Amino acid sequence: MIRTLLDYYCFPDALFGGLSPVADLASGANGFFQFGEKNICYGRNRTGVSIDVAGSGQFDASKDVRIDGQAIRLPFDFTDVIENLRRERYRRNMSLGKQAFSAGKSVRKLYYMVREWLPVPVRRQLQQVYLRDWKQLPFPSWPVDFTVDNLHQELLRLLMAASGTNKVPFIWFWPDGSSSCLIMTHDVETAAGRDFTPQLIDLDASREMTASYEVVPEERYEVPDEYVRKIRESGCEFNVHDLRHDGQLYQNRETFLQRAKKINEYITKFGARGFRAGVMYRNLDWYDAYEFSYDMSVPNVAHLEPQRGGCCTVMPYFVDKILELPLTTTQDYSLFYILNDHSIDLWKKQLSLIRQRNGLMSFISHPDYLINKRNRRVYEALLDYLQPMIARENVWATLPGNVDRWWRARNQMKVVPSGDGWEIVGPEKERARLAYAVLDGEHVRYEIAGAVKENVQR
């Protein structure tokens, strides 16, 4: 059985009686193709590939799926496609023009050289110009992309249909039967944001919210021990935010390794477990140098980020030993200063879509920008919207570190036969819930054993 499918669902290994998906590939280059009407993939495909996203619809791999004895023969390697999406390797073949990563490094270096001398309005105008084509980007899908989640669900559907299985037990995604998960994170950009942190902690607490604070350890501002202590005493998390937040972390491998070593030292010094890179810059193929437990640097859809791309999933996933908690909603900075939007309408739309898929709702808001009273009123409106939603829909609102612990425990659990049914064994099994993927015509829906069905995906 394909490991990534087992990791995603945590269903019994031998459930399908030996029926397993296998890749039946022809030689050739990586490119774009589709699996079904809307699922854009990137990798090798026997059916054929396009060099750009626009041509992916010419090659529908779902038409070349074959069942041969005990195998479902796919014209592509499922694991490779999932990794290419999660690690954003498809960006190598995307026509990004001025946004190409290789060109972006030189532009980025020049920008950060002059940044501190540029007035804030000028900086924001340059960013708006740089990102002005965001609506024209064809992939990932705005405002939330579910391609990775769709692919897992579609492969499970194929297995169920081919084996005559109508109901598959698996370990539900979230503890205690929660319908979905929500985390709030605050990136501290400046000394002013650091000094506003106590007020933001109180504001969150007034709506029963706790958050993770990502703090820049070098150059930008001092990080007193008392500041770290107050964050933790409030029930919040303290994490590391880049090294210097100067856009240079991934400039080249040598620089990265030097900085990664220092980041690891700060992780140890502060007793932190999580990390986020400045400006969401990232290169997941270099994460082997890091020693933190979880990362929060990859957007689901990066249309409004300087580094375009996106991991195309609303679920946590492992990058080797590190757990990635993707950003699945628009940053407050992008909302206020790129889109010039001071409503919570976009956030509400993204939240609705993510909840329909029982996914992770993750936010970045900055104390630096919430000092502004107009911005803060928008954030307060968001909190006022979230508080009843969390209670009404049984959402697990928690800290990123708790999601990391849960996802690691879930990854070690198993579903095993028990009498005429199934049970979950492994760490934290008391919080785990048995769920079922149910074949419903051409679709798969989820049910939590003994749960109200309205809280899970239809």
Image (cartoon, grey):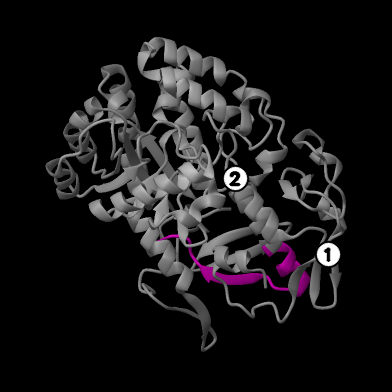
> In the drawing, does residue 359 fall left or right of residue 292?
right
Three-letter amino acid code at the position of disc 1: Asp
Q: Quadrant of the N terminus?
A: bottom right
Check the image and report above or below for 141 versus 20: above
| N-term mark: 2 or 1 | 1
Q: Which residue lies under the disc numbered 2? A: 312
Q: In which quarter of the image is residue 273?
A: bottom left
> Callout 2: few (<14), some (14-19), or many (20+) C-alpha neighbours within 10 Å?
many
* SS class, disc 1: loop
Cα distance, mark 2 to mark 1? 25 Å
Q: Please state the horizontal and vertical placement of residue 228, each as a whole percent of the image.
A: 18, 45
Range shown magenta? 156-174
Q: Please state the horizontal and vertical placement of residue 453, each as a whole percent of the image.
A: 50, 58
Q: Please state the horizontal and vertical placement of residue 400, each as a whole percent of the image.
A: 35, 51
Of circles 2 and 1, the one toward us is: 1
Q: Which residue lies under the disc numbered 1? A: 24
> In the drawing, does residue 417 fall left or right of residue 387?
right
Three-letter amino acid code at the position of disc 2: Cys
> In the drawing, does residue 311 fall left or right of residue 111?
right
Check the image and report above or below for 65 versus 422: above
For image coordinates 43% across by 10% down, the residue present is 122
- Evaluate whether residue 227 shows in this view: yes
- Evaluate whether residue 316 shows in this view: no
For image coordinates 52% across by 48% down, the residue present is 314
Q: Is residue 168 magenta?
A: yes
Observer-nearest of 233 and 31: 31
* SS class, disc 2: loop
Q: Quadrant of residue 276?
A: top left
Q: Does the magenta stretch include residue 102?
A: no
Q: How many labels does the image show?
A: 2
Observer-nearest of 57 and 351: 57
For image coordinates 51% across by 89% down, the residue present is 419
